[in-house]
Image (cartoon, helix red, strand yellow):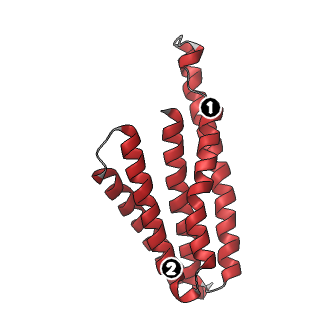
Amino acid sequence: MNRLRAGVLGANDGIVSTAAVVVGVAGATDSTSAIATAGLAAVVGGAISMALGEYVSVSSQRDSERVRGFADEHQVNPWSAAIASFLAFLLGAALPFAAAVLTPVSLRVAATFTLTLVSLSLTGALSAKLGGAAVGRPVIRVVLGGTLALGATFLVGSLFGSQL
């Protein structure tokens, strides 16, 4: 369950944060190289940050479990959570990054928005199914959150990009 949680969180964060960065930059410029550079930096930095965050968080949980006397085989593994989060972030980030870099300029933002929301719908549905929950609410939750993030960063890029 620990790897599932880390994987879902990593994938969703990879999707949303990468898409938000590339859409924000696309709101400011049509430059594919600027969008690709910002997107690649977001992917690398985000994957490392998620892995480190998982490792630190799960290590703290494991320390607490040791103090409480949990048997080693019942303790969470910080390395498995970190690796799951890192790989899931990279996987999640791939589609919005590719959409922003490979799509023609005239379709770039719409394609990235669309593929991001489809990706979030899939991860929301998959995580609900794997967790034994109904699909509707988790999908709505992640799609609304993704829409908010992308809309906000596109607005920022559009409003301030030409002035910087």
Give residue 77's position: percent from left, percent from top: 60, 28
Mark yes or no: residue 68 visible.
yes
Q: Identify residue for label 2.
A: 109
> Taking 52 as reference, is 37 above or below it?
below
Crowding at mark 1 (Cα within 10 Å: few <14, some 14-19, many 20+): many
Q: Position of residue 106 (x, y in %)?
A: 53, 89
Q: Residue at x 64, y 62 (%)?
A: 42
The picture places residue 132, in percent across and down from the top left corner, at 34, 38
**Depth order, front residue of 78/118:** 118
Amino acid at pointer 1:
Pro
Q: Is residue 21 above or below residue 85?
A: below
Q: Residues within 10 Å of mark 2 (few under 14, many from 20)?
A: many
**On residue 23, which mark appears?**
none
Name the residue located 58 percent from the left edge and 49 percent from the top edge. 88
Task: Name which quarter of the figure residue 98 lies in.
Answer: bottom right
CA gap between label 2 and label 1 equals: 37 Å
Q: Which residue is mark 1?
A: 78
Q: Measured from the top left, where is residue 135 in percent x and y?
A: 31, 50
The answer to whether residue 149 shows anywhere in this view is no
Decide which of tag 2 and tag 1 comes sooner along the chain: 1
Q: Residue at x 48, y 40 (%)?
A: 5
Residue type pointed to by label 2: Val
